Amino acid sequence: MEAPRLSHAILDAESRNAKARKIAMLSGMTAPNPGMRMLEVGCGSGFIASYFSKLGFGPSGTFATDINDERQVSEGYSFRKVDDTRLPFPDEHFDLIVTNHVIEHVGGLAEQRRHLDEIHRCLKPDGILYFAVPNKWRFFEAHYKLPLLSWLPAPIADRYIRLRGAKHRYDCRPLSRGEAETLLSEAGFEAEDKTIDAIRVVGDLEGNVGAYRIANNIPDFIFRSTRGIVPTLIFVARKQR
């Protein structure tokens, strides 16, 4: 019998609200029109869904799902607990769907494909998908605080975390840029890489912080040369026409 998946939800309000602002800016959804609907898949603490409700989607237009209920804020949106990658919503129902650091937790390649297939089904023809996933080739694996963990084959990764005191398997499957682009395309999406734009957006939001002030002045070609190892890959996608 497979062990239950561990929780990796980030539960603090400050970081989640900052993330929500970044998602709104990158997706172009800073001022949603009346009657629009959005869905956050894998909502964790609930702060992002709550932010989008206040942004303009409202309680009747904001929805969230997760396999666990770890919400710190539950007002302003409708929550559905799910058991797997299936989404309990009609076809072409949402103007915006957010899947932020979720796909690496749903399982192997088949489950990841179903995750995106379900999102494609529920997204309106002119809707927007915000998709973020940890980079497989990042130097430091953030969930387990171990260097190069996601580079390793699954059996070796399991041994690695157990040597460091964990009593379970490595339950995440980050993606490389090529893998992410392929999965999005196979699911019927046209995806635009927003990784560099995301760095700029964070720089604008945190411009008074030293590291971000420096990052804001770095030319794009330098960022492009290091895209293979940036910690997070971010795409904004629409359905293929």
Image: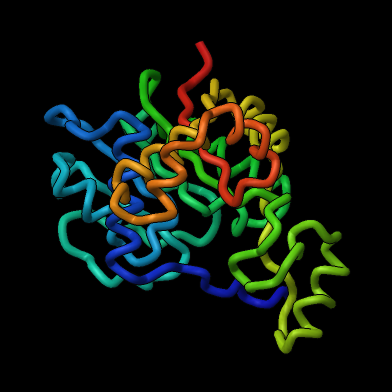
Q: Nearer the viewer, residue 158 or 74?
A: 158
Measuring from the top left, give residue 127's x and y in whole percent: 36, 25
Q: Which quadrant is home to the N terminus?
A: bottom right
Q: Residue at 41% across / 49% down in the picture?
A: 212
Vertical side of 76 occupied by 149: above or below = below
Vertical side of 181 occupied by 214: above or below = below
Q: Is residue 173 left or right of residue 160?
A: left
Measuring from the top left, give residue 87's x and y in whole percent: 45, 47
Q: Nearer the viewer, residue 183 or 198?
A: 198
Q: Is residue 30 left or right of residue 71?
A: left
Residue 167 visible here: yes
In which image quadrant can residue 150 be found? bottom right
Vertical side of 85 occupied by 37: above or below = above
Residue 93 visible here: no
In which image quadrant can residue 24 be found? top left
Q: Residue at 20% across / 41% down in the picture?
A: 61
Q: How many marks?
A: 0
Measuring from the top left, give residue 69's x and y in whole percent: 38, 70
Q: Residue lying at the far top in this picture: please name it.
A: 241
Q: Residue at 66% across / 39% down in the picture?
A: 226
In which image quadrant can residue 82 be found? bottom left
